[in-house]
Amino acid sequence: MKKTLIEDIAQRLRIIPDLDREHSSSESVNLRKFPDPENWHDHVELDANEWPKRVERRYSLVPTTCFNCESACGMLAYVDKESGQVAKFEGNPHHPGSRGRNCAKGPATINQINDTERILYPLKRVGKRGEGGWERIYWDQALDEIAAKIRASLKTGAKDRVVYHVGRPGNEGYVERVLKAWGVDGHNSHTNICSAGARTGYSLWHKHDRPSPDHSNAKVILLTSSHLETGHYFNPHAQRILEGMMDGAKLIVIDPRLSNTAAMADHWLPTWPGSETALFLAWAKMILERGLYDREFVENWVNWEAWLEADYPDEPSTFERFIELLLEEYAEYTPEFAAAECRIPVEQVIEAGEAVAGAGSRLSTHVWRSAAIGNLGGWQVARTLHLLNVLTGSVGTEGGTSPNSWSKFSPELFDEPPAPDGWNELHFPPEYTLSHYEMSHILPHLVKDGRGTMDVYFTRVFNPVWTYPDGFSWIGMLEDEESVGCHVALTPTWNETAFFADYVLPMGHASERHDINSYATSAGKWVAFRQPVLREYARREGREVEFTREVNPGEVWEEDEFWNELSWRIDDGTMGIREHFMSPYREGERITVDEYYQYTFERVPGLPEAAAAEGLDALGYMRKHGAFLIEEATYSKHEQEGWPTPSGKQELYSPTMVEFGYPEHAIPHYRIRSHVHPDNLQGEDEYCLLPNFRLPQHIHSRSANAKWLVEIGHRNPIWIHPKDAAKLGVAEGDLLKIETEIGWFVDKVWVTEGIKPGVVGCSHHIGRWRRAQDQGNRFLSNEVSIEDVGDGRKRMRTVSGVGPWESDDPDTNRVWWRDGGVHQNITHAVQPDPISGAHCWLQKVRLSRPSADEKYGDIEVDTEKSFEYYKRWNQMAKQRETHPRGERRPLWMKRPLSPKKEHWFIPE
Ligand code: SF4
């Protein structure tokens, strides 16, 4: 199509993207002025701060990757050659995922590394755990003491008492390998409060548990959440969604909240939370009725015959009959039914449904967090969303939606220790037979219930006291030395969980550590290298560095070298651990971190050849460029590989669900009403609290020390629709008391039509706190008092908000905001979905005006009530516990750090 004059001018002014461009995940746009990598060690530019004087600064540009969300966008650290320090971060245009662009959180890495309150040295607690006393120790002491505790635990033969609990992973297989070397089933993650609901829905179809939408080439982009602004994969997806839209794609956003993404959509469908499944089934029915399904794909790649055989054995096993029976099965899912469930106009259901039905093979879809992690039965949201891809034949196509594992590179490691010889029931309790990830959100309750304890518990870039629901139960567990023998917090910044540690060990930010990254942020497959930039700068300058902590601020280290060193010290020479940490290049000697990455990069397809073309080895190439494109696009892999399910097909019909005691969910249906379905609320007095949306400029709990980000966003008011505000008699800025199942909090009101009536919203991220004895994060944390008011009841009150302070950074004295928000998560009850195991984030709440003595930021929680409430939800899983053939869970499904096969069975 010819450009208009206005488009031409807009393009020249770069107000809009280049309409003439070819789509390519590797091509960088408008890079004529970007310095060539050949010159990255000697880049000269004028110092903007000196303007109007023309003062030149010399930089070494070192590529690394951002660590502030999962996307791992490319960044270039500008190392000032005069100071030898990083001056700023910009995007790396040669990174195939991010293509030179970052969101606000990328460049704000400079705030994190220059944070005047960061943890610079290893610390050991003084006094009781949680009291706030710390002493500085040396790495040697920390390593020796922690190694001794782990050794003692391993020598008991226990396989489940040394645990590594990760928040933001950011690497590929490194720690899993270490845990296997130790022989423990000790991997725990945050996934069950994040993506586990959606993963279950996708796994049931094809084992792959995440989607990878090809937004750039789509005709219709269907988002069940708000990815463009905040979710996975924020910046890489946002730029591709916009590319798709510039090429005419229609954007449909399903979200009860008018997110930034929804605001840009062609169709915003503010569905009632949990009703999305009904909507997708209505659209599936439209596709079937109108004959718009892709017969070739469905007939050949879906196990429809298995369904007929199981449920309709007397019917002819023909494709035509299958379609008729599926239509009968889905007869109830009319547009009117969906509209009533979703509480949106039926015209909207039909209009958006027609766009979806007409997308053909170019339907890119995504669900992350949001509905799939919000609702009881949320996993069905992902399962029915994928049904739309299956019916339109847009699975694995250009412009469609592929399994993420097709675009994700899995590194080959230099050594693979054997699988753990045990099963950790604190992570995978037997009643959660289909839980896709560790039941980490109920860990304190399982411990309280007498199901196990831990000798050594590592929390790594993980802050459950603040991020998780029911944080007071986490504090209770962490304070109890019988439950947790030793708590080691590995963290780049202070957090509420580290306050309750025995050791706080400072780990590097993005530019201070090594990691391999590869994520399905586009249709291609890439690998990237997060590297400690001052170490690479030292190498370029000809200086030898043995350990990364030698170049990082203070004694900040990185986990890779820490795990190697710790593992070596655990083994007293009798435990067989050291043999897994030997160099693959130097017989009989310990591996170095450089050798680890050298080994892996040498085995990346195509990388050694690309490196050789520049006269480099594979590691040298990655040090120089920071990223490598392995495959331009990864479409249609099923045509060679098939699908890794028991049937080898897409499983519309799941024999697994039948065998594990859920026959009513054999095929996708809307048979579970969310716990926040209007029928489950007490009339109009109860509301649904939507607490699981992000602010685009914040990280869960690692941005409270990033001054630029905090200045942009530092409050989390309650979003409330004007109709509800009028009903409750509240206006903008008034206080509301929000009562959950286990407590309450007091927050300010934001009256907005951007939220559905009957639903109130409160963003994640904000409401950080510290007590008088704690340190760190003063840009965003309130000082609070915590009081035990008896019978398991805890009360938190704000003592003071945010304010300026004197430091080496003049900006700390310029802090103008005073409001640090309210910590809502701590008042949330845990709600483990009995099938997926995922936490159901949405909360039933009652709203009222607070009494005179209840102030903004006040919080109260009854931990006895929270334990009883957990038991009610746990009972739902226990009632249906079924183990066909003695299997703890389906043998074909994924599990992080899988133990030996014999442990997948319940012991006789
Ligand atoms: S989307 Fe933003 S926070 Fe995430 S990796 Fe990219 S730049 Fe960093």
Image: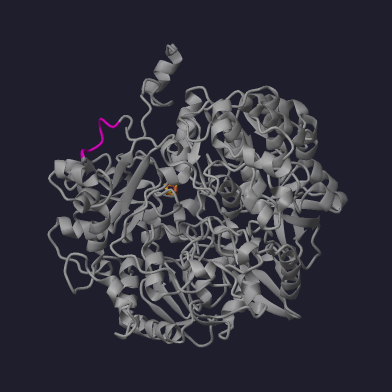
Q: Is residue 72 magenta-colored?
A: no
Q: How is the image coloured?
A: one colour
User: Number of callouts in the render?
Assistant: 0
Q: State left or right for residue 395 relative to residue 690.
A: left
Residue 629 in the image: x percent, y percent? 31, 41
Task: Say whether residue 35 is magenta.
Answer: yes
Instruction: Look at the picture and state if 439 lies above or below 540.
Output: below
Q: Residue at x 38, y 35 (%)?
A: 633
102 horizontally vs 356: left or right: left
Residue sitting at the far right? 683
User: Which percent across, then down, holds residue 167?
Assistant: 49, 62
Q: Quadrant of residue 843?
A: bottom right
In this rendering, the answer to whether 273 lies above or below 81 is: above
Question: In the picture provided, is 337 more to the left or to the right than 226?
Answer: right
**Residue drawn where x is 71% and y is 46% of the image:** 274
Q: Position of residue 702 (x, y in %)?
A: 48, 60
Of 301 and 253, nearer the camera is 301
**In front: 876, or 771?**
876
Q: Magenta span covers which residues?
A: 31-36
* Residue at the spot 54% in from the left edge and 50% down from the top edge: 713
In the image: residue 352, left or right of residue 780: right
- Rendered position, 741 above or below 74: below
Quarter occupied by the N terminus: top left
Q: Main SS type for the magenta part?
A: loop
Q: What x and y, as percent, mark residue 421?
A: 46, 74
